[in-house]
Image: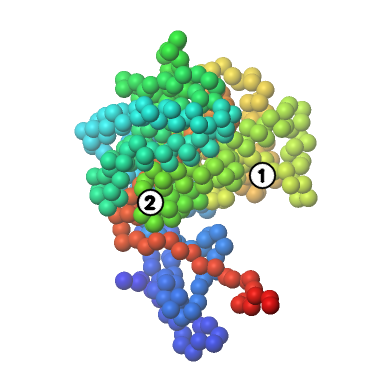
């Protein structure tokens, strides 16, 4: 039942149209415009920035207030008190797990981390210098060819098996992509390691030498995964939902999300931060680049500052800054030239009136880029890390949609091309 009603008067239509208005538990009301189609009308909303395409109980964002909630829990509390796999469970099931449920869930994920051995041969079809995201799109989409025993999307058990497989295998595939690019052998996951320890083990160890994983670096990776786990109806999540609305299998849907995430306006932001730092090159050039950023006539802009959604501050950034400081101290990299540029830029952005007035504060991409660079992960792998962390959010939204009375997505258009015309004689 609608909580309120809106009225719409359109020239040429005699009746005043009544449109239901619904209230969410928090956030803006939404006007139900579905009846307009029957009147020969569509709404026009490029980018869908004013359109609620779905109802969801998973994640809520209030950009003006700097709020990000997963199932009602603030992101800073989850980052402090939870861990990535517990947050995965929360996103999938709606509640935090009991101790027994968490133990079972962690065990299930560990037992799904290996990939089919034949999948390793799939990599040989790619060039060694291919972009890691190009390979991730291919290998994740190919999972449906190897794990087609649980692809009935209308079976709740099948959906959850696929969810577990995706969450478990994404770090394995991500590490395989990296190893393939540098010509090193793939490393098998180790069940005695935590999720993030396992990822770092598969990334940086070799059969010749297996080093102990630093707890500080493992915690940093866990937080990076956690802070990227979901972000409401963003471009990649909406892509996963749209692909899923056709009845496509979950592996194909997640591959579509990876493709959308690849865009530099979405998941490539932390990669763009490092590219910017390299462009600046030296601390002596910072003032000139800051001046360029302030110049309205100059297209240059500082990457990693401000956020399209968060207008005051990114609630994830404070947690990520703390983690950044811990990682740099652990690795003794405070004197790294690029990191010194980054720290000076951070100081300017938090003290300069120009940046403060415009809300151009360091965001999560700024700090995660610095952390990943410090750990030794190359910039072209950054978006792959993002995709790995975002997988539970994508799967949770896909599962929520499939569990509901959904319809195939079919956006409309404002047609401005030729009307009907005859083929010339």
Q: Quadrant of the C terminus?
A: bottom right
Residue that carries the numbered disc 1 in the rendered image:
355
**How dense is the environment of label 2, judged by Cα within 10 Å: few (below 14), some, or many (20 and up)?**
some
Q: Quadrant of residue 161?
A: top left
Q: Quadrant of residue 242?
A: bottom left
Q: Where's residue 103, x and y in %?
A: 25, 30
Q: Nearer the viewer, residue 337 or 355?
A: 337
Secondary structure of the residue carrying numbered label 1: helix
Q: Where's residue 326, x and y in %?
A: 50, 24
Secondary structure of the residue carrying numbered label 2: loop
- Residue 88 is at least partly visible in this image: no
Q: Where's residue 196, x and y in %?
A: 40, 27
Q: Quadrant of the N terminus?
A: bottom left
Looking at this rendering, what residue extends furthest in the left direction? 100
Q: Nearer the viewer, residue 120 or 59?
A: 120
> Does residue 80 lie above or below 38 as drawn?
above
- Residue 275 is at least partly visible in this image: yes
Residue that carries the numbered disc 2 in the rendered image:
248
> Does residue 79 lie above or below 236 as drawn?
above
Disc nearer the start of the sequence (1/2)? 2
Looking at this rendering, what residue extends furthest in the top direction? 208
Q: Nearer the viewer, residue 36 or 311?
A: 36
Instruction: Give the left or right position of residue 68, taking residue 283 as reference.
Output: left
Instruction: Give the left or right position of residue 367, taking residue 248 as reference.
Output: right
Q: Residue at x 71, y 32 (%)?
A: 279
């Amino acid at each position: 039942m609608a909580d309120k009603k809106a009225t719409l008067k359109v020239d040429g239509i005699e009746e005043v149209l009544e449109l239901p208005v619904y209230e969410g538990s928090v956030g803006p009301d939404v006007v139900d415009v579905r009846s307009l189609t029957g009147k020969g009308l569509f709404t026009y909303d490029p980018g869908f920035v004013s359109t609620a395409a779905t109802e969801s109980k998973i994640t809520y964002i209030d950009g003006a207030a700097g709020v990000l909630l997963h199932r009602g829990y603030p992101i800073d509390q989850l980052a402090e008190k939870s861990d990535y796999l517990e947050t995965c469970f929360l996103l999938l099931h709606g509640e935090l797990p009991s101790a027994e449920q968490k133990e079972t869930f962690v065990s299930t994920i560990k037992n799904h981390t290996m990939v089919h051995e034949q999948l390793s041969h799939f990599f040989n079809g790619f060039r060694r210098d291919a972009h890691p995201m190009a390979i991730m799109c291919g290998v994740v989409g190919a999972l449906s060819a190897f794990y087609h025993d649980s692809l009935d999307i209308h079976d709740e058990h099948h959906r959850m098996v696929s969810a577990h497989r995706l969450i478990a295998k994404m770090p394995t595939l991500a590490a395989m992509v990296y190893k393939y690019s540098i010509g090193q052998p793939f490393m098998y996951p180790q069940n005695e390691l935590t999720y993030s320890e396992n990822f770092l083990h598969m990334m940086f160890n070799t059969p010749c030498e297996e080093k102990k994983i630093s707890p500080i670096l493992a915690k940093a990776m866990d937080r990076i995964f956690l802070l990227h786990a979901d972000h409401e109806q963003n471009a990649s999540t909406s892509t996963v939902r749209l692909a899923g609305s056709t009845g496509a299998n979950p592996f194909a849907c997640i591959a579509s999300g990876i493709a959308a995430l690849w865009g530099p306006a979405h998941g490539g932001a932390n990669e763009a931060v490092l590219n910017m730092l390299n462009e600046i090159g030296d601390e002596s050039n910072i003032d000139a680049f800051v001046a360029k950023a302030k110049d309205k006539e100059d297209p240059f802009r500082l990457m990693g500052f401000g956020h399209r959604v968060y207008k005051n501050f990114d609630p994830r950034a404070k947690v990520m800054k703390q983690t950044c400081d811990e990682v740099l101290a652990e690795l003794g990299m405070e004197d790294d030239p690029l990191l010194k540029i980054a720290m000076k830029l951070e100081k300017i952005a938090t003290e300069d009136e120009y940046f403060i007035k415009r809300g151009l504060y360091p965001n999560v991409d700024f700090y995660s880029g610095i952390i990943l660079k410090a750990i030794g992960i190359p910039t072209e792998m950054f978006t792959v890390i993002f995709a790995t962390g975002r997988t539970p959010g994508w799967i949770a939204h896909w599962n929520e949609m499939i569990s509901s009375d959904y319809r195939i997505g079919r956006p409309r258009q404002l047609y401005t091309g030729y009307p009907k015309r005859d083929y010339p004689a």
